[in-house]
Image (cartoon, helix red, strand yellow):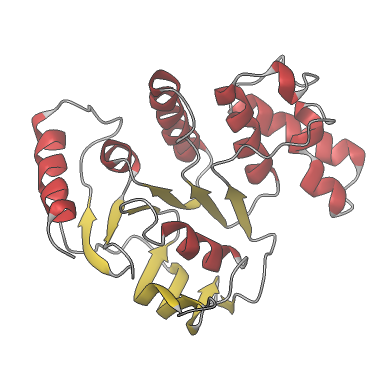
């Protein structure tokens, strides 16, 4: 399960990426010499301990940060900043509280000048896709945490990006809702294929979702190992194959950096 298989053309390329944050006393090296490619329609999970640099890597791909050295490209173009080819779902559910569900979902299209009829049509499609039919006119305050995160996913999908970047989107949810959202994301990904890079520090979540898992070391983050997850979907958390892979990766994560 350790050799990368070829499923399509590379959409994301990170070439010798390093990231250092300066401070008053000394520089803090977060990422060191990361080489990573993600193929079209692949669901790649970045797995590692808390505060190891996973979110920094996502921010570099999103164009929210710039690498200290190396470069990132998406769809063959060097990343210079945020762009509509990348949708981002963050851990914090950052919806506009004064907008309804449909208002939040269509917001990106509205900013791009898409006609009201077209953006409403597209927003409704993605609202239906994430299972929020009937909640189009609800404000965020009236929605549960899981429902608000569904709105965030629908909003990111609605701009129809080539790449979806998800930075621990389910970590703030209770355990039952988190399992449900993992199942929902897998279902949505099967219907509406996108290249997804998903960040988590939850090993079971990584195995459940991933085509491929990239295990990072602690700071400065390096790629420790890659795993191809060939288990059939939908996956069973307690199958012997799932548990065997869980133990193998857990041992790697517990080993010295």
Q: Which residue lies furthest to the bottom in this view?
A: 69
Residue found at x 70% / y 49%: 159
Of 115 and 156, the residue lying toward us: 156
State the residue at coordinates (55%, 70%). Answer: 75
View extreme (front): residue? 25
Q: Quadrant of the N terminus?
A: bottom left
- Left or right relative to 177: residue 159: right
Q: Where is residue 11 in the image (x, y as percent from the top left)?
A: 48, 67
Q: Quick one: quadrant of the C terminus?
A: bottom left
Q: Is residue 44 left or right of residue 26?
A: left
Along the viewing direction, whichever of 29 and 6 lies nearer the viewer? 29
Q: Where is residue 7 in the image (x, y as percent from the top left)?
A: 34, 60
Above or below 224: residue 182: above
Q: Residue 25 at what x, y percent from top left?
A: 48, 79
User: Residue at 48% across / 27% down in the picture?
Assistant: 173
In the rendered image, the vertical position of residue 61 relative to residue 180, given as above or below: below
Q: Depth check: give the residue in front, 212 or 118.
A: 212
**Is 108 placed above or below 188 here?**
below
Q: Nearer the viewer, residue 95 or 117?
A: 95
Q: Give left or right: position of 154 versus 42.
A: right
Residue 29 in the image: x percent, y percent? 40, 75
Question: How many marks do you count on the picture?
Answer: 0
């Amino acid at each position: 399960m350790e050799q990368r298989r070829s499923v399509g053309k590379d959409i994301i390329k990170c070439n010798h990426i390093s990231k250092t944050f300066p401070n008053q006393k000394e520089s803090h090296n977060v990422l060191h010499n990361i080489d990573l490619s993600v193929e079209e329609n692949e669901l790649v999970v970045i797995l590692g301990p808390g505060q190891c640099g996973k979110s920094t890597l996502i921010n570099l791909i999103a164009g929210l940060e710039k690498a200290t050295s190396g470069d990132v490209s998406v769809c063959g173009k060097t990343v210079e900043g945020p762009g509509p080819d990348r949708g981002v779902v963050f851990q914090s559910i950052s919806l506009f509280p004064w907008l309804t569900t449909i208002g939040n979902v269509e917001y990106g299209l509205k900013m791009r000048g898409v006609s009201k009829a077209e953006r409403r049509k597209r927003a409704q499609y993605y609202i239906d896709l994430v299972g929020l039919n009937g909640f189009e006119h609800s404000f965020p305050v009236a929605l549960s945490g899981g429902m608000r995160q569904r709105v965030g996913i629908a909003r990111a999908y609605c701009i129809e990006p080539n790449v979806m970047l998800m930075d621990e989107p389910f970590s703030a949810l209770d355990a039952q809702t988190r399992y449900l959202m993992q199942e929902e994301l897998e279902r949505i990904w099967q219907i509406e294929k996108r290249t997804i890079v998903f960040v988590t520090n939850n090993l079971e979540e990584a195995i459940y979702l991933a085509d491929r898992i990239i295990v990072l070391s602690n700071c400065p983050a390096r790629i420790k190992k890659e795993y191809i997850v060939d288990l059939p979907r939908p996956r069973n958390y307690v199958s012997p194959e799932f548990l065997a892979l869980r133990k193998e990766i857990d041992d790697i994560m517990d080993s010295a950096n």
